[in-house]
Structure formats: structure tokens, C-alpha cells
Amino acid sequence: METISSIKTRVYRFGNKNADGSSEMKNLLGGKGANLAEMSAIGIPVPPGFTITTEVCTAYNRLGQEDTIYLIKEEVESAIDFIENIMGCKFGDMENPLLISVRSGARVSMPGMMDTVLNLGLNDQAIDGLIRKTANERFVWDSYRRFIQMYSGVVLGMKPLTKEDIDPFEEIMEHLKEKREITLDTDFTVQDLKDLVYDFKDVVRKRTGKEFPMDPWEQLWGAVMAVFDSWNGDRAKYYRKMNGYPSDWGTAVNVQAMVFGNMGENSGTGVCFTRDAATGENVFNGEYLINAQGEDVVAGVRTPQQITTLGSKKWAELAQIEEKDRSENYPSLEELMPKMFYELNQYQDILERHYRDMQDMEFTIQDGKLWILQTRNGKRTGAAMVKIAVDLLKEGLINEKEAMLRIEPNKLDELLHPVFDPAGLVKEDIIAQGLPASPGAATGQIVFFADEADKYKYTILTRIETSPEDLEGMNVAKGILTARGGMTSHAAVVARGMGKCCVSGAGALKINYKERTMTVEGKEYQEGDWISINGSTGNIIEGKVPTMEPELSGEFAQIMSLSDKFRKMKVRTNADTPKDAKVARSFGAEGIGLTRTEHMFFEVDRIKAMREMILADTVKGRKLALKELLPMQRSDFEGIFEAMQGLPVTVRLLDPPLHEFVPHQLATQKELAEDLHISLSSVKTKVAELQEFNPMLGHRGCRLGNTYPEITEMQTRAIIEAALNLKEKGIEVTPEIMVPLIGTVNEFVVQDEIIRKTAEQVFKERNNKVEFLVGTMIEIPRAALMADKIAERADFFSFGTNDLTQMAFGYSRDDAGKFLSIYLEKGILTSDPFEIIDREGVGQLLAIGTERGRKTKPSLKVGICGEHGGEPNSVEFCNMIGMNYVSCSPFRVPIARVAAAQASILDKEQNS
Ligand code: PEP
Ligand code: MG
């Protein structure tokens, strides 16, 4: 038995406007537990309960069940006492039973990732007491059958056996509905529900070989342990991996008194947001259902109604429902229960002001009494994130730095994604409409199962509804379409979190999983058919629709200029064409940090000359071919320099192994032989000669320019001539010529000499001059270590962290995919080092390189141009070690600007 100090509190109580914990204790109590404590302490009516800490979950993973129960038993028993006293009922009592919920709650919200058990404490005896107490037999039997169903799934592991299988309990219910010729769960009579309970218990007996547990304490411990187990379930693991959360965080368990929204027409339940989670607009909104439990709202079985009358009217307009029909059949909570709405509206205001952020709240009305079940900072789209941060700033609830820190840089990506081109849209092609659940546009081929979402290149995952098991497929698909479910359904919430386009609740779609078809008003669509969805309007469109770049909002511009106020580092872009350069400039790039010249050689008109150069056996032959390439390179550079209008441009000399440029197929080899008037066998011999065992460590980078100096000469000439041509047009450029992949000082010195000599030659010929710099990439560990010596000659350094990571780890960039995912799964690596800079190892090389370089040359300009330059965590590291700039792909420029600003805000906060 492990000894952990017995004084330590492992169970924290909340309720009756009091709490042992607070919102600061998220790591220990999980987000949900900390918020429940906080809410209770500020006077919000939350049902009383307690939280078992995340530390207990971590201990459970070492200790196992028995010892864990022993560790917390006393505290849990006393906490149950506490709830009993507040609610005036007793756990396991036959007359007046206390029912509880058991939920998971990690330190960050992981929607739908972990399991929940409701109505725990019910058994064959307790139902009688509850019936007497509530005088509502139907509600009690309904709660009992829900409990058996949930508990069996979550704790006893009774899940569908195959993906086509339906839940065994759902199957029983469907049979009964068919037999009784009814369609809704609410149509079941008391006798039906009793029969269901009997049948459910029978299934449990048959499947598990045991009776369904009747002892409430056995039920409670089973549920607590199941929540702990769910932390290591596949869904949670996948979610952690996707978000980079460590596995040792653990989850807390929240045990809370049940309150019931299904106690009749004076009860209900709902979900609400203090602002619009899709657009960020400051409007209170949400959905509710009368006489229902929480699951009913998100499960999408019944159509949820809107909380506010304004929202209800908008919804009816979209669904094409007449006002009279709406107000009679789908009234808002505001209309139906004005007192409850008034209270709820007050609490949402208090909570938003308290947390100073948009809140996502769950509430239940039990027989005319409002309970707030939970609140958390609401998940939102990228657009909403930006608007809410700017609005809260304007409203004085947060300051500029806080507004900056409210931006999740990676989420900005969503705003930059394409929308449908209106010119390509034909109104008649709209086949149905659903709810605009997560904005953006997507076009793809229909797939019906999440594990087949990668069947085609572009897919729309089309489902009756989604569940947490579908997460991976949802991530892979271009868009998500569901026939059922409201704005708070699983599909909608998860899609918004992922920034993925989603249309939910499109009731007109009849989906048949067995046949793999979708029918809309008599027309059948098969798996593989193209459809398009618009997550901003809810439109579902037949066929492919072309997309176009989005327009950026004023708030986006405000966040961008705010980021410029705070950041220290410059943000450049990696761009190989004038088009990319222009896009990047429009996103605020302050120069080009990397132009990969080889990309230009792959275009049809150039590849031939390039191949001719590679196949030439003599210097003379190579020079002749390079002469053909010169004007093309020069005009490429002119285009890029012009697009950047005088901003700095770093051009890298040829880098990849030459075999990448030669044809490997017989037909193209034949073509090349004919074009160059040489024999096929000489082409084949040359191609074979270029083949290398380790091309990434072979004849590439500066090794090309050092063995074929004429290549460096031609490229330098093209760069300098382009700069001179622009100078004559009135555009001043200072090209930065960059030598790739050096490991020794001499490798750089030889290239530097060639470059400077060639430049002087061109200046003489043209009788004109431009300023230029000669620097190098640092992408071989040895170069980082020799930085002091290299800086004696180099004007600047740019860290090529793709190669540096490859060489520091010894993982091939091309082959690492085979084992990286397994390493991540097994926890051998905590994140992919090609994605997020490995601060511990590769980070040292960056720090040493920068420090040693600057020791020789204090003004040395240092930047990064590997993929990490646009990844927020890596950008923060670059800021920490004092880099001058990061360079990233054009669409990541806004992300890097915000990440750089956040890095300097946090840096200052830490140092003040
Ligand atoms: C790098 O290695 O980080 C780099 C930018 O160069 P490339 O990816 O072209 O090898
Ligand atoms: Mg490289």
C-alpha cells in the first residue's frame, strides 16, 4: 500500500454557496470541478457535490482499484453525507433516495472524450421511494432504464460489437417501438419502460454473466473507476495526441446530486452560450428541451428549441417555419418560462463577467427551480475567437495583453481558409439545408463511416449523427454533415473545436448505413458522390463547388496590428514565387526568409535545361546548359523582388540532390535522350550514377556548389542582375544570398568567395552596384557548434530546423513517418520534433549557434526558416533565445505574428 500523507485532501466538496476548492485549482480538480467550486462560491445555484482529484487518478494507475478505494473511502463517505444534508435525501435509501451523477473532468475540456454516468443510486427498491416522492412513475422508470443503459455501456463495457451494429439497448427499444407502432422515446408507457428495464437487465446478465449491481456503493465505486479507466481509453488517448496533452495529467471525477429536467412540463434542460460561438456576436443564445435530460439536447433525437425569442425567430426563418407554427410548437424559453429565462439571463451575465470570457453553460430546470450544472470558457470558431477578444477589449473586460493571449494562433488558420466562390454556386443545386454548425466551405466525396474518411482525397463525412468514436475520421474529412443534432450536438461542438466546416441536423437526409446511401427528397446519393456543404449557411449542395479565398474582418486586422505592437521578432515568409510572396505580404510578411530556388527548376520549360546541365560530362557542357537557365532564374528573382517592394529577400542556392531532377521512368528517359540527342544508355548510366544510399546526407546543399562552382556562379549572377534591373526601375533591394547545408567553415568560405567574385564581375559589367549579404543556413549540428568561426565570414544565419532536427535525432525526414506515430503512442516522444521544435535537444543547438555566432559578431542577424517558423510553440522558443526573425509559409504568417507577440508578452511577464 502506497503511503501518501493522510492529511492530504483528495476529495473537495461544493454546494450551498460554499466550496473547498476554487477556479485556480484546475490542475488538481480538473476544469469542470474547479468551475463548479468557483460557481458555488460566487452564489450560482449548482447542485451540491464533490470532486475526487486528478492526483487520485494518477495514483489509481499505479495502485489499482482496491488500494485507491481504501485511500479515499472515508473522504468520499463524508462528502456523500454533505450532499445528503443539502438535498435532504439519502444515498441508497428506499424511501427518499439521493441520486448522483459521476463525470470525468480533465484540466482542459475534452468534449465527449470521457464517460459519464447519470442517475446513479437507482435500484429495484429506490424506484419505489422515488415514485412516492415525485408522484411521477413514468419519470422514475424512464430514469431507471436510462441509468441501466448508461451504466452498462460505460462501466460494464457493453458497447456495440461492430460498427454496423447498434447499441444492444437501442435495439431492444427499437423492437418495442415497432411492436407498439410508436416513434418517440416519450411515447413509451410506464409498462413499456418497466418491460425495458426487465429486458435490459436480462441482456446484462447474458452478456456479462452477472446481475446488474443493486448496491449503490458498488455502483458508485464502479463508476468512479470507469472514469479513471476512460482516461486511458482510445478516445481520450487520441484527443490527447491530437492536442499534445501529456498522459500523466489524469482526470478528476465529479460526483454531484442529480437534478431532473424530465420531471414533467415544468422541467427542462438546455445548453447556452453567452455569445455566439460561431460568429462571436455578443448575443445570448442556446437551446433547450422541455421535459428532458441533458443527453436529449445533444443527442439530437428531438429538435431542441431556442432560448431567446430572437434566436427562435431566426431559427424558424432558416427552417422555413411560419411564425404561428413556431410560437405554438417551438416557443423560446423566454416565451415559455419568462421567470426562468430572466434568472438564467442574469446568471449568464454574472458568469461572463466573473470569468471575463464567453461561457458555455449547461442548465436544468427541475420543477420550476433553475440549476446551473456547469460553465466553462466556450469553444469557438477562429472568427468568433478574434471577435470576442476584440469586443471584450472594447468593453473593458480585458486589457490589450489579455486580448492578445486570448488568441490561439493555430486557430487563425480557419479564417484564412477558402469559402465558396459565389460565381460557382447555382441556387437550384441546393438539395437541403441543415444548421450552420461550423463555418467554412467544403467539397468532397460522400463517406458514411469515420474509419473510411480517408477513402478519397476529399471527403465529406456524412452521418445520422456523430459520436466520440468518430473523432479521427472527423479530423481527416474535409467537412462533416449530419442528419440529426442541433448546434450543440457532438458533431457541431467538435467540428467548431477543430475549425472544420460542419452542417448538422439536416433532417431531410435519409441515411442508410447498410446500403451506403443517402436519399434526399427521393433522389439517391451513393458513397463516392460529390457534395459540398457550407458551414456558414447550412446549405447542402449537389456536386463540386469551386472555392475562393476568404475576406478578413476588421477585428482580424485589429488583432494583427495589436500583435505588431507587442512582438520583438520580425516575421518573414518562405516563398518561391511572386504569387506566394504577394499573398504573404498581404498577411504582413516583412520579407522573405527562404526562397528555395530549386522549385523553379521543376517547371516544364526549365527542367529540360536543368537535366541537360546535370547530364553534362564537362564543365563546358554544364556552363552551356546553365546559360540557358540564367535568364529564367533572373526573371524569377525580378518577379519576387518586385513583389516584395524593397523588403529583404533571402535566396538560397541550389540544395537538393541532383537525382531528384532526372527522370526515373523509361518513357521519360527515352524522351530526354531524344531531346538531348544522346543515347538512352548514357541517360540510364547517369541516372544510376546519381543514385545514392542516403541522398539526404549525400551530394546536396553547398556540396553541389563546391563541386560544380558554375552553378553558384550562375545563380549569383541571376540574383545580382535581377537586383540591378530593379534598381534601374527605382526599387532598391538588398539580396541576401544563402548557402545551404554547410558543416565546416571552409565549405562556406569557398562559396562566399565565388559569390563575392561573381557579384564584383557583374558590378563591373553593369557599371552599377547593389548592397548584398552572404549568409548561411545552420542545419548541420557541426555548423551550430562552429558558429563562432562561421560568423567571422557570414553576414547572417538562418536555422534550417528541418534538416537540423533530422540530423540531431538521426531520423530521416522521409522515413520517420514509419515509427514516429508509434513513438508518440508509446510516449517515447511527447511530440513530433519535425512539427514542434525539440527544445531540450535541437533547441540547445539553436541556442549555442546563436550565442556563439553573436559572440564573434554581436550584430549577427539570426532567423529560422524550417517548418517550425510558423508553429507557435517553436516561435516562442525562437523569441526566448533572441532570434531576429522567424520565416514561415505565407498562410502561417498571421499565426507567427500572433505567436511572436504572445511570446514577448509572456517573456516580459516572466521577467518582471
Ligand atoms: C530546413 O532544412 O529546415 C530547410 C528550411 O531547408 P529544406 O527544408 O529545404 O531542406
Ligand atoms: Mg534544409
Image (cartoon, rainbow, N blue to C red):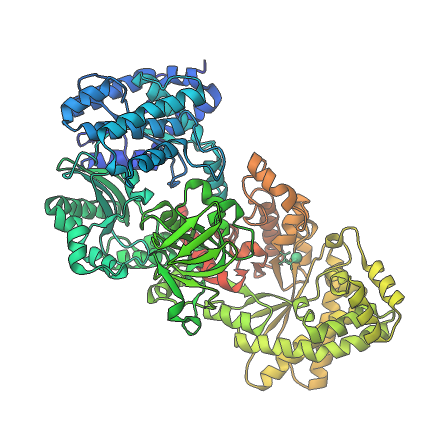
The number of callouts visible is: 0
Q: Is residue 912 above or below residue 662?
A: above
Residue 555 in view (yes/no): yes
Residue 210 in the figure: left or right of residue 374: right
Q: In this view, does 892 lie above or below 833?
A: below
- Residue at the image point whose x is 38% and y is 17% from the top: 211
- Front residue of 714 and 60: 60
Q: Position of residue 397 (x, y in %)?
A: 24, 53
Image quadrant for the N terminus? top left
Residue 331 in view (yes/no): no
Q: Position of residue 791 (x, y in %)?
A: 65, 59
Residue 623 in the figure: left or right of residue 275: right
Q: Where is residue 781 in the image (x, y as percent from the top left)?
A: 67, 49
Residue 403 in the figure: left or right of residue 680: left
Residue 499 in the figure: left or right of residue 241: left
- Residue at the image point whose x is 61% and y is 72% from the top: 735
Q: Where is residue 293 in the image (x, y as percent from the top left)?
A: 25, 37
- Residue at the image point whose x is 69% and y is 85% from the top: 766
Q: In this view, does 547 lie above or below 84?
A: below
Q: Residue furthest left?
A: 339
- Front residue of 609 and 152: 152
- Front residue of 335 and 672: 335
| Rendered-image quarter of ligand 2 | bottom right
